[in-house]
Amino acid sequence: MKILLVNGPNLKLLGTREPTIYGSETLEQIVKKVCDTALTKGVQITAFQSDDEAALISAIGAARGVYEGIIINPAAYTHTSVGLRDAISACGVPTVEVHLSNTHKREAFRHVSLTAPVCVGQIMGFGSKGYLLAIDALIGDH
Ligand code: DQA
């Protein structure tokens, strides 16, 4: 099984970015952990991060027929991007949305996700463990 792991804007700053909210692991460390865990389950991960909404949309648009699942942390675009939502919906690949923080405990503008309604499900508030839980969710879905 092949899964595309997509991380959105500012997530490359993990490690130093507001560690009390997002933890102290770097994105590189998280991606390695996800890839290693996935491999033990026979899952191959391709990881992609971009700050660019168009690049994220293109990556999702190209996923059909290549990946059986997508794990995405759309970061700030969660709350703003109809384009990303439409890309997830259009590609038809089962997608799990992950957030490191529990966005419902935070500012009101983070309480709405435009992307979650077109995902299989959403995992939030468990730090980087959420990405690992998402692997199991997609294996179950497959
Ligand atoms: C985030 C939550 C978003 O509200 C925020 O814009 C992020 C990270 C999270 O993983 O908790 O950049 O997606």
Image (tube, rainbow, N blue to C red):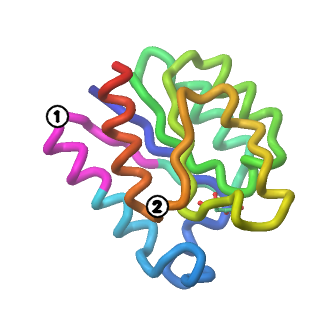
| Residue at figure coordinates x 64%, y 33% from the top left | 58
- In space, the residues marked 2 and 1 are separated at their CA atoms by 24 Å
Q: Are marks 2 and 1 in contact (CB under 8 Å)?
A: no
Closer to the chain start, of discs 2 and 1, is 1
Report whether 34 appears left or right of 99: left
Q: Of the residues shown, which amino acid type is indicated by label 1?
A: Gly
Nearest to the observer: residue 98 or residue 105: 105
Nearest to the observer: residue 75 or residue 129: 129
* Whole-percent x, y for residue 63 in the image: 50, 25
* Whole-percent x, y for residue 94 in the image: 49, 23
Nearest to the observer: residue 139 or residue 10: 139
Extreme residue toward the front, this view = 105
Mark 2, residue position: 126
* Whole-percent x, y for residue 116 in the image: 66, 36
Residue 1: which disc?
none
Q: Which residues are magenta?
A: 34-47
Question: Which image quadrant: the N terminus?
Answer: top left
Image quadrant of residue 118? Answer: top right
- The quarter of the rendering in which ligand 1 is drawn is bottom right
| Eye-nearest disc, 2 or 1 | 2
| Residue at figure coordinates x 73%, y 41% from the top left | 54
- Give the crowd class for mark 2: few <14, some 14-19, many >=20 residues within 10 Å: some
Q: Secondary structure at mark 2?
A: loop
